[in-house]
Amino acid sequence: MNYCQECQVSVNGEWLSCPLCHQPLEKVSDMPTPNPYPDIPLRFNKQQVLRILTSISIATISIALIIELLFLRSPRGLNIISFGIVSMWLVVLIIIRKRRNIAKSIVYLIISLSLLSIYWDYVEGWSAWSTTHAVPMICIFALIAMYIAVRLVKIEVGDYILYLLCAALIGLIPAIFLFFNWVTDPVPAWLSIGLSTIMLIVTFIFYRGEVLRELKKRMMV
Amino acid sequence: MKRKNWVRLDNASNIFLASVTDFDTKVFRLSATLEEAIDPILLQLALDKNFEAYPLYRSVLRRGVFWYYLEESDLKPQVQLDEQPPCSQLYHFDRKELLFRVVYYQNRIHLEVFHALSDGTGAMWFFEDLLSEYVFLQNDFVSAEISKESSQSERVVDSEHTDSFIHHFRHKGQRSYAVATQSAIRKLAGASKTAGKFALNYGKKAMQYEMTDKEKKKKRKKVYQIKGKRTIDNRTHVVELNMSVQPVLKLAHEQNASLTIYLTALFIEAIRKTNPIVEDGMTIAVSVPVNLRQFYDSTSARNFFSTTHLEYTYDPSEKTNLAVICKTLKEQLQQQLSSNSLETRLNKLIAYEFNPLTRVIFRPIKDGILKIINYFNNRRLTFAMSNLGSVHLPQSIDEKVHQFYFQTSAVRPQFCVISHQDYLSICLNSPFVETTLYKQFVRDLTALGVAITISANKIDGLELRGEQN
């Protein structure tokens, strides 16, 4: 046991200086009493790593942009690069934030990537490639991806069923594109509508009770 | 497939979720020391057995559109070696995990609980039963080695000594998940809608009345905030003080105060001594939780406490001493513990829980609002103290358990008090590196003749490395 003359306290553990006043301790007995608080190494400092990674990314991105601006002088390339960067960050952030819920992260990805592609199309002078190809394709493959993911990871039905339902409902949105004639080729939109409808019917037949229970739980007022 | 039970989390517990941060994890820790080093296998057995009797502890926290809810889970708790800083995060966003953990180190058993699940008193029930179970198992094993017969007779004696009434009575109310997980306030209100409406009106009136009178006064006050440098990895800085109850009680009685009031007053003085600007008319405000079970008949293991707000304003023209502070605090506490004042407070809580407006607000918005409320609450406080009082165990177990300790994660410097037999433990918790305030508080106590032994956790790399060399 060690003793601090200044604070007049006995100190448990192998402290050399007083934990309160940081003055050297006096040894009272040779038998050190163990500290009930184990030495726990500093935890990994996440924030710092994230900060470093972000600054490196920003530096790389700015260099790429400067090269693009000064030497290639093509505004279209600049557009593509910046949209690429935005979608990269979007995907990374969504995956990090929703990493514990695959189904939810897929729904978030469908929505954000679709909106991003529509905006991109709009900025580039609207050739309707986003509503014709991009959005329906995102919807179709996201549904397939979600189906595979929930099978592989084996999450409970209750945990993904509402997100599957959401994704299937979003997959019906290309019907609006068809209705307003925002498409140059109707096939992808029809494919998306078809797959979504099948998913909805399957969900309705097999998982109706589960969906209602989950809705009741989550919408509890 | 077995359908999972679930229950909505009450508003009172929602505030804990809204105010969780990396350094203020809203986790508290109850610890006890036994004679010998803890046997993890026995502890696991005791935990498994005890876990059965407490359905509330099976819950995981989920997020709905309007509310958080507790869902029954199949997860099984595992005892762990103490390898994380005290009161480390228990609830992680989107992850299904139990809201408590049982940890051991040397001869200590720790129970850490997320505050949205239960309060100190509720958790103490679980902890006491866990300790009893452990001690029983341990004794059985010891006697089994000597002779089987004697073990049996010992068992009989043991169960006679156990205050089984308390133990069984508690369990009875908690067998079913739905009952165990219900909010304590809802239980008290009988969950009737009329009660809710009545309480809403009553609560509103009471609130208006309270606002006009009290708020005006509060605005002029400058509440002192303790500032400091955060620990590197957000761990809670702990300095644990161990002493004998009697000398401190004697000191408190000399000032005609309870232990809670006396220690609070001492801490207020320590703050003044370390920060001279306080003397120029600043207010030191402290929040002290009060267990409502002592006023209302409730066996709920859920959160059931109210907080009292005590404060002392230094007047530069007057000379203050400990006695004056004790007297002021005592009067404030008595006033807030009057049945009238408690009733108002409880009605307000019921009103919140049943308020149709707060019900339909989306949960993320609710969280935001609660965060703001919490921010302003924090601004009105200098520190917090919590006293769990004196722990009494059934006789046969009482001898085997030496000392209890109690601490929480901290958003600001604060302290927790608990006693058992003649041992008093005060845990000073803080998110800051600095020890000036702790030092002052401890020196004030030792100067009064109290013998103190301290233990502390290491908070920076230098300390950790320095010790290894």
Image (spheres, rainbow, N blue to C red):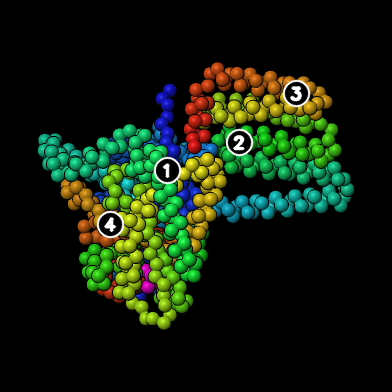
| Label number found at residue B207 | none
Q: Which residue is mark 3?
A: A188
To which chain does the residue with label 4 belong?
B
Residues marked 2 and 4, same chain: no
Question: Do the residues under discs 3 and 2 have CB atoms within 8 angstroms?
Answer: no
Q: Main secondary structure of the magenta part?
A: helix
Indicate left or right for B18 with B323 as reference.
right
Query: Alpha carbon of mark 3 to alpha carbon of mark 4: how far?
Result: 70 Å
Q: Which residue is mark 2?
A: A105
Of A106 and B10, which appears nearest the observer?
B10
Identify the element where label 3 is drawn.
helix
Q: Residue at x 32, y 74 (%)?
A: B324
Q: Residues within 10 Å of mark 1 (few under 14, many from 20)?
A: some
The magenta stretch is B266-270
Q: Is residue B367 above or below residue B286?
A: above
Q: Residue at x 59, y 27 (%)?
A: A165
Query: Alpha carbon of mark 1 to alpha carbon of mark 3: how far?
Result: 55 Å
To which chain does the residue with label 3 belong?
A
Q: Residue at x 28, y 70 (%)?
A: A28
Q: Which residue is mark 4?
A: B389
Residues marked 3 and 4, same chain: no
To which chain does the residue with label 2 belong?
A
Question: In what quadrant of the picture does the C terminus of chain B appear?
Answer: bottom left
The kind of residue tagged 2 is Ser
The kind of residue tagged 4 is Gly
**Of circles 2 and 1, which is in front?**
1
Indicate left or right for B385 with B395 as reference.
right
Instruction: Tell me if residue B441 can be seen.
Output: yes
